[in-house]
Each structure stands twice: as C-alpha cells, then as structure tokens.
Image: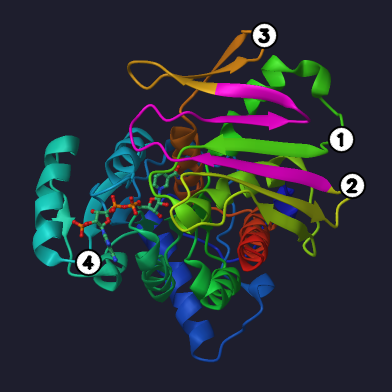
C-alpha cells in the first residue's frame, strides 16, 4: 500500500460524500474542458486522517446504482445488492436494457432490501443519480456501463470479464479514462480473496516461487464462451500470486478441444516476463446446476471448494483438511465500499488496481487471440 504522503491532492469537504463526489466531478469536468490531464495534479480526494474528529464520527452512506440488477441467467445483481447493503451502502437505483423489466426488477429488489429502489431508463441516467455504479449485466452491456460511470464521474465496480474480446481497444481506452479521472475501477474477480485458504492448508508454500497455477471452473455455456467467461478468474489468481510486470505476455497457448460445442476443455499457456515463467491451466467442464465443482492448485497443491447449505464456503486439501473462508464476493464489496466511505483513493493503490486490470485485459486478449 502507498504511504499517506503519496496520496493526493484535492481537498474534500470531510464527511460529506456527495460533496466530495461533486468536487471530483467538477475537477473532472474542468479536465474535459481543457484543464489539466495529468492525474498527478488532481482528482484524488485528500485522505482523511484517522485522528480527524469527523473521520471518526462521519456516517457516510454512498448511494449505489446497479446496471443489470436481476438474474436472468447467472447475474449476481441480487447478491451484490445484499453485500452492498451489509457493507453500509444504499442501493438507490437500478437500470437494465428494457424499462418494463427494470421496473419488475426494481420491485423485486425493493422487497429484497426493504426499501424503495428507483428504476431508471438507462445506464447514463442511473449513473448521474448515484455515488458509484455497479455493472452487473451481461458482458455486452459492460462498456456502456463503464462509459456511463465515466460520464457521471463516479467510481465503478464491473463484472468480469471487463468487456467482450471484440471490445478490447475500447476497454483499454476506458481504463485509461478512469486513470486520467482518478476514479476507482474494480473488476469483480473475487477468487484471490480465497487465497487465505491456500496459505492455511499449505503453509510450507509460503515464500516459495510460484511456478504453476491451475484452476477448475464449471461454466454454464459450452465452447469458446466457456473460456471467455472463466479466463479472468485464473488470470486474477495468477496476478495475486505472482508480481507480474506490465509487459508480461502469454505464450504456448493450447486447448484440448476447440469444437464450438465442447463441454470439456483444458486451456494451457505460459506467462512470461516475471522472474520465472508460470504455467497456467484452466480446466473447464460445463455444469449448469449448483453446486458447481471448482478447485485451484498452486505449484500442484490443490484445494477444492465446498459449499454448505447456506452457501458457507470452505476449501478441502487433497489429504482432507478443511479451511473456511468468508464469501469472497462479500470481501470484494466490503473493500469497494470502504474506499467509497473513506472518501479517499490512495493514489498508488488506485493506480496499481488499474494497472492490474489493464494487464489482465492484455493477458485475456493474448490467450483468446491464440485460440
Ligand atoms: N464474478 C463471478 O463469479 C460471476 C458469476 C456469475 C456471473 N458473472 C458475470 O455477471 C455478468 C452477468 O451475468 P449474466 O450474463 O448471466 O447475466 P443475466 O443473469 O443474464 O442478466 C443479469 C441482469 O442484466 C440485465 N441485462 C441483460 N442485458 C443487459 C444489458 N445489455 N444492459 C443492461 N442490463 C442487461 C438482465 O435483465 P433482462 O434479462 O431482464 O433484460 C438481468 O437483470 C456477466 O458479466 C458474468 O460474467 C460473474
């Protein structure tokens, strides 16, 4: 994490989230109108110190909008909404691709959360009325969500993969725009939050160089879609385990079954550019029903995910030992909200997060382009 001294730079009315957001928007609007483009000069709200009286007493409830709040297939909107509320944020509104279905989803979400949730016509309208935007819709709608967050000058949590492979250039442009605007962008790759289980089950691995990462996931759709849907997860695990440089690349990409209807496939590749090459394997097998089998292995030490009746999550080592973890989705959302509530983005941390998203996009495209 960066030091406080490295954090910068515009003064925010302490304890007033909406005013802080409006400060960011004003500075951003200034930049759009020819103001400074260098992120080092502006945008990142000044950090509240732990000793500041208002930092201790302020009750900040960020208003969250969700684009794609329902669940037609695998969408996580209702679960994200639940964790945002538990994290101390307020789901204020939603939008979708069809206004009548958005109205239905808004009623369902109001009942789920116990308070009114407004329905908006589109992503832009929604983003203008909230303090942060969650993009939970299918990947085809992600770019519109990212652009809406940028236009409104609000932080964004976007589902994986950040965009469809065909929109990679636009995605890189959007990431740069978040960087320029000093706005937080998080991609919902939650698996790294389970690595506490790997450390608990294989403590002898601590400090050992990581030479291989393998993962088994069970997507619903077969063929290439299965890979596009799952690839971000194994790349995010790799990034959490290995400090990869920005120029890291993929090589030697192969898959076991390239047929469009393949229900089983193994994608193998190497990631180069770090101290050592890392061998990555993504094992995929269609499984439309829950609970979907999932495991990962680091340096060949494998842990299998287990789901309890109330979605309690644990991992089992090959010799039967078990480590419990908190729901990684909840941990990701808590972290996102914590940054919103603190009215701060430590600049080095925020930039590293954007760098990680950018590298993930490049590696994601690098693999898919070879298949
Ligand atoms: N991080 C994870 O582990 C994880 C797990 C599961 C899914 N996901 C990701 O979550 C995202 C959504 O999953 P899904 O594709 O299965 O979603 P889905 O359930 O088909 O749809 C989710 C919601 O989005 C709405 N929607 C559909 N198209 C839209 C559009 N173009 N613009 C705005 N809203 C739209 C749907 O409304 P209507 O259909 O009623 O219009 C529904 O309310 C995907 O990116 C997927 O990869 C991530």
Q: Which residue is drawn at 15% across and 50% down?
A: 105
Asked if the stretch drawn in magenta spans residue 281, the answer is yes
The number of numbered badges drawn on the structure is 4
Q: Nearer the viewer, residue 159 or 351?
A: 159
Against 363, is 310 above or below? above
Q: Which mark is residue 319?
A: 3
Q: Residue 97 carries which label?
A: 4
Q: Mark 1 points at which residue?
A: 209
Q: Distance between the residues labelled 2 and 3?
A: 29 Å
Q: Earlier in the sequence, mark 2 or mark 3?
A: 2
Q: Residue at x 61, y 8 (%)?
A: 320
> Of discs 3 and 1, which sits in the foreground?
3
Q: Name the residue under label 2.
A: 276
Q: How far apart are marks 3 and 4 (CA)?
A: 48 Å
The stretch in magenta equals 278-304
306 displayed left or right of 144: right
Q: Earlier in the sequence, mark 3 or mark 1?
A: 1
Q: Residue at x 78, y 53 (%)?
A: 271
């Amino acid at each position: 994490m960066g030091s406080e001294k490295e954090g910068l730079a515009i003064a925010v009315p302490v304890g007033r989230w909406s005013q802080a957001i409006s400060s960011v928007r004003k500075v951003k609007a200034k930049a759009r109108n020819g103001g400074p483009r260098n992120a080092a000069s502006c945008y990142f709200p000044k950090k509240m110190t732990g000793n500041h009286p208002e930092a201790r007493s302020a009750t900040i409830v960020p208003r969250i909008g969700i684009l794609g709040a329902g669940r037609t297939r695998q969408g996580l909107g209702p679960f994200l909404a639940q964790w945002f509320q538990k994290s101390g944020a307020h789901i204020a509104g939603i939008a979708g691709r069809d206004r009548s279905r958005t109205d239905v989803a808004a009623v369902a979400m109001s009942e789920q959360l116990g308070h009114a949730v407004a329905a908006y016509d589109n992503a832009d309208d929604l983003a203008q009325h909230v303090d942060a935007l969650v993009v939970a819709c299918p990947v085809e709608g992600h770019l519109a969500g990212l652009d809406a967050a940028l236009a409104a000058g609000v932080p964004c949590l976007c589902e994986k993969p950040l965009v469809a492979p065909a929109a990679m250039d636009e995605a890189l442009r959007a990431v740069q725009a978040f960087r320029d605007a000093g706005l937080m962008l998080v991609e919902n790759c939650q698996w790294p939050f389970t690595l506490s289980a790997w450390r608990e089950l294989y403590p002898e691995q601590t400090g050992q160089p990581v030479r291989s990462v393998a993962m088994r996931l069970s997507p619903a759709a077969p063929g290439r879609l299965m890979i596009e849907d799952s690839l971000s997860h194994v790349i995010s695990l790799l990034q959490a385990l290995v400090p990869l440089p920005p120029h890291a690349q993929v090589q030697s990409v192969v898959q076991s079954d390239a047929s469009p209807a393949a229900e089983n496939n193994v994608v193998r590749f190497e990631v180069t550019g770090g101290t050592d090459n890392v061998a990555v394997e993504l094992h995929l097998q269609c499984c439309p029903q829950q609970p979907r089998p999932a495991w990962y292995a680091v340096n060949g030490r494998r842990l299998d995910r287990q789901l309890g009746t109330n979605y309690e999550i644990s991992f089992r080592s090959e010799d039967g030992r078990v480590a419990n973890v908190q729901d990684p989705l909840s941990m990701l959302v808590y972290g996102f909200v914590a940054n919103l509530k603190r009215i701060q983005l430590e600049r080095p941390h925020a930039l590293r997060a954007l760098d990680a998203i950018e590298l993930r996009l490049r590696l994601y495209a690098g693999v898919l382009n070879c298949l």
